[in-house]
Image: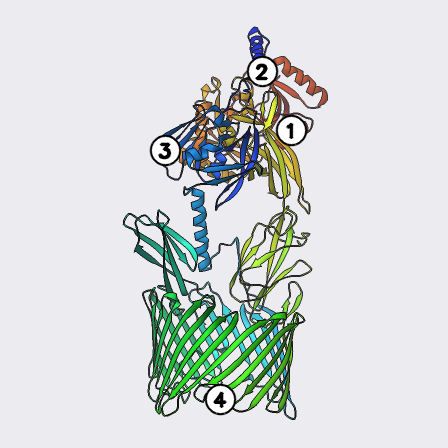
Amino acid sequence: MTAKIFQAHLIEQEENPAFALWRLICCFLLLFPLTSFGQEEGGYDEISVYFSVQGVGGAEIPAAIYGQQAYLSLPDVFDFLKIKNIPAPRFDSVEGFIIKEEATYIVDVKNYQIRYQDKRFDLKPTDLIRTAGNLYLKLDYFGKVFGLDCKFHFRSLSVKMKTELDLPLIRLLRMEAMRKNRAGLKGEISPDTIIKRDCPLFKLGMADWSIVSKQELEGASSENLHLALGSMIAGGEANLNLSYTPNSNFSLSKQYYQWHFVNNKLRLMRQVRAGKISSQSISSISASVVGVQLTNTPTTQRRSFGSYTLSDFTEPNWLVELYVNNRMVDYAKADASGFYSFEVPLLYGNTELNLRFYGPWGEERTKEETISIPLNFLPQNEFEYSLQAGVLQDGDHSRFTRGKFNYGVSRSFTFGGGVEYLSSPTSAGSIPFANMSLRFGSGLLFSGEYNHGVSSVGRLSYLGTSNLNLVLDYTRYVKDQIAINTNTLEERKLSLSFPIRTPNFSAYSRLALNQIIHPSGKSTRAEIMFSGSVFGANTNLKTNAIFTDGSQVGVSSNLSMTFRLPSAYTFSPRLQYNYSQNELVSVSAALRKKVFKKAYLDISYNYNLSSESSMAQIGLRYDFSFGSASVSARRSNNKTSFSQSARGSLMYDRSTKYLGTNNRNMVGKGGIIFLPFLDYNCNGHHDKGEPKAWGLKLRVKGCSRVKMDRDSIIRVVNMEPYRNYTVQIDPNSFNNIGWKIEKKILKIEVTPNHFKRVEVPVSVVGEVAGTVYHREGESQKGIGRIIVNFYNSGSTRIARTLTEVDGYFSYLGLPAGSYTARIDSAQLRKLDMMAMPDILPFTIKGTVYGDYVDGLELVLQNIDRDTSATVMAVKEEKMLASKHKDVKEKAACLIQVAECKLKSKAIAVRDHIRSKFGSSVVIVHEGLNFKIFISGFEDCEESRLFLPKLALEGYSDALLVSVKEYVQAINPESFQTSGDELINRGLFAVQVGAFGKRSNALALQAHLDAIYNQTTAVEFEDGFYKVRFIYFNGRKNARNFLYNLLGKGFTDIYIVPVFRKLSF
């Protein structure tokens, strides 16, 4: 690597003997190059390698190859691993800490050493490569010093890293996975957009129909017609079911109609039902109830019950992982006494907990526990109620009312109660009732209910290890009660179930006992069932025994099996055997075959040996897209009968003029219509002239049927109403990379009997690409890790990107419009560099496939304090007058904090800076913008040291502005540092060059006067002769002229605000 000792000056110098001697020395050094590492020199290749971490993933990382040795970018590797690192401005050092704040490190380039955790590692000059924008460390030292063992594969240009450290990246990914598991258990997924359901005043959406006809040879025939209509009325679901049989009269009492309003976000009342309602009564009611029901119970199924603290002891310093339903949701390290604690999420139903313990020497232990939460438990402090009132269609118009409530006292105790009234002559009148649910430990549950004057009910259940489930039920009826149509006095039930698993056999077994006590005696029924897979065949064996007072015990078994045969046949034999009579009662067999892809052929035969009767049947069912139809024939007891049926549904959406069909019942269900379109202006709205986008792919969680029509519209049907569905849109749906989807996860609430219209904007974006070079003397080379910011026409930063190792940068995601590219000003200050040009304009055109702009070039150059680079460092000089009399005697600097279009916003920024720092703040009205400046600094160095404080407050784009001594241009009395007065100015000049020799400036002026019809001037400032075009009324005019100069090949051009009219 050759050290670059000489860099040509940008400003011409007078020829003198000292300068001639200096040129001779430089020539000598160029003829005899020096070798140096840890500097910004050549002799190596900067590339990108794929850096991967075992169990985590990988990314492209800048690297350098010198000979056969690989070097990795230290800041990039640590950034990927989430290790804190702070590079020095010129990458002379990198410091930070690993995992713990006390584990500090510093990589010292100047002294060739690394200090980490009070240890020092000496480096060779060849172990480090420093460039203008990066620092590379030899691959071996990542493992020797930091414990990050890396292996470089030259053929694939990849680096694989292994480590025993619990790095921040690994810990973050593990915590993110646990958060997702906990959210998945509770059904919580963070969407990008939440779309609420519609509540139209009236909308007809769904209809179901069915026809059934039966004929019997030498007998009667019957027909039944059914029609169901589903609509939305006044924001609620309205369903009407009509049934008609030609041989009977049409009766309104046999029809079903109901209006159902739902708002799950309300707390006092979430559901209202009107029409035929479900009575949910204690009393036996056979007639329909027409009335109203109010409740605050949500329609959505509860999943999360809360959480509880699980704590115990294990071995000291062991790692403990908590798994809920086979998903890891948390982990902890036991303390010195072995104590650990978890906050366990509880779910309704059975929750399987699994604790896994890991010792320091590879020991492993496990512990399992099951927690059962039935649905009759409420979360703590939650209150629910239900009120019903209606009239029975029993001919007597009996009145029925019922009110009940439930309250969650704690996680283990829920109680409730209420009262029921029925005015029927055969009813018990008013029935007060109360209920409670208790949980003892993790698996023992008790629930009880008392119905005054009617019955008492109790249930005790236990869920043990290995899924052992024991349930005891007891019901006692009050003698001579008339509310429930039964003469039973007591009911006793026992159920014991557990799984059985062997290598060739797995089954579910259940033992059930049911005893009924009535006035004339008692009867007991016992049942043993085994259901599972035996050598690949689904098998069910059920044995029943009936014990009745004064009667013989009856014991019988039913065995059924299902075999899958070749050619998609399914064969199901069944038999029944009576042990008491020691005889085979019946045998049957069924054969099923899928034909024509959508048709099913069923053949069955049954023979009863006790009654010597038989039954044979053959049927065919075909599923069309619009419905299903079936025909069958049966021969039983010398009688032959035939039946035909057809059913289907209709779906209608007025907004898209869609009329569809389905072979499933759709009334009460909902649907979603997705309409993707090309969003040219990226405003998220479907404007006129924006076409449809073809090819969108999505997945709806909980729904398997997603249909795309020819017109690019996607329809999802047969969805549960009032449920929130999570829709995941595939971001790689389109072949065109210029089509982007901003909102990828949607949460949509489904409306019953209605298609929810969801427009999916597909943003058409463009791509910009270019290169950032680092100029040193007469040569320039691409530079990596440089931040390029992109600003829109309103000077608002909307995106940023990072250059690759060769200086190349690209960004995809810019909507159509005018933009500028700029190097990040904060990074330039750290690197002590300047960019040429400072602002690079470009335009993204609005096209169907997205525009592509290439060839942007930005050049970085080190600032030389002894040359005109000092002048170049301040790209746009701001010359403000000051009321202080000593301003003529010394040059100072201001800080431009921000630039606002609104005066109110500028005043807000001014007030914030005053209250935070107590600084003197000035607002200047320039053209259409209001600029905020901080003044009162002694010199430029003091103002430069103030910039980091502003960056911490969010003003990262603040820049230095030189104060010029043009007091005559502005009335000093009108300029107040308090910022209460605004200075209005609007003249600008375009500076095209700055020279140390006046002759060079005059030569350029003469050249410009010859080719441009625009006044030029030469001004002497800060020891340099500056050539400028004067004057432009407004920044816009000056900017347009600047673009013209750029097109002619001029570089290093700047717009300079003018504070007075100069005379030359």
In depth, the one of 418 and 802 nearer the eye is 802
- Compared across the picture, whether 431 is left or right of 673 comes to left
Q: Tell me the mark number nearer the camera, choosing from 2 and 4.
A: 2
- Alpha carbon separation for disc pair 3 and 1: 55 Å
Image height of 726 relative to 210, above or below: above
Q: Residue at x 55, y 15 (%)?
A: 1023
| Figure coloring | rainbow
Q: Tell me the mark number nearer the camera, choosing from 1 and 2.
A: 2
Q: Which residue is mark 4?
A: 395
Mark 3 is on which residue type?
A: Gln
Residue 316 appears in the rendering: yes
- The mark that comes first in sequence, 3 or 2, is 2
- The mark that comes first in sequence, 3 or 4, is 3
Percent x, y for residue 589? Answer: 57, 80
Q: Which residue is mark 3?
A: 117
Q: Tell me the mark number nearer the camera, choosing from 3 and 4.
A: 3
Percent x, y for residue 950? Answer: 45, 33
- Alpha carbon separation for disc pair 3 and 2: 42 Å
Q: Which residue is mark 1?
A: 1042
In depth, the one of 768 and 896 nearer the eye is 768
Percent x, y for residue 1054? Answer: 60, 26
Dot 1 lies on which element? helix
Question: Residue reaching furthest left?
Answer: 337
Say which quadrant the N terminus sits in: top right
- Alpha carbon separation for disc pair 2 and 4: 115 Å
- Alpha carbon separation for disc pair 4 and 1: 94 Å
- Alpha carbon separation for disc pair 3 and 4: 91 Å
Q: What mark, if any, has residue 30 been given in the picture?
A: 2
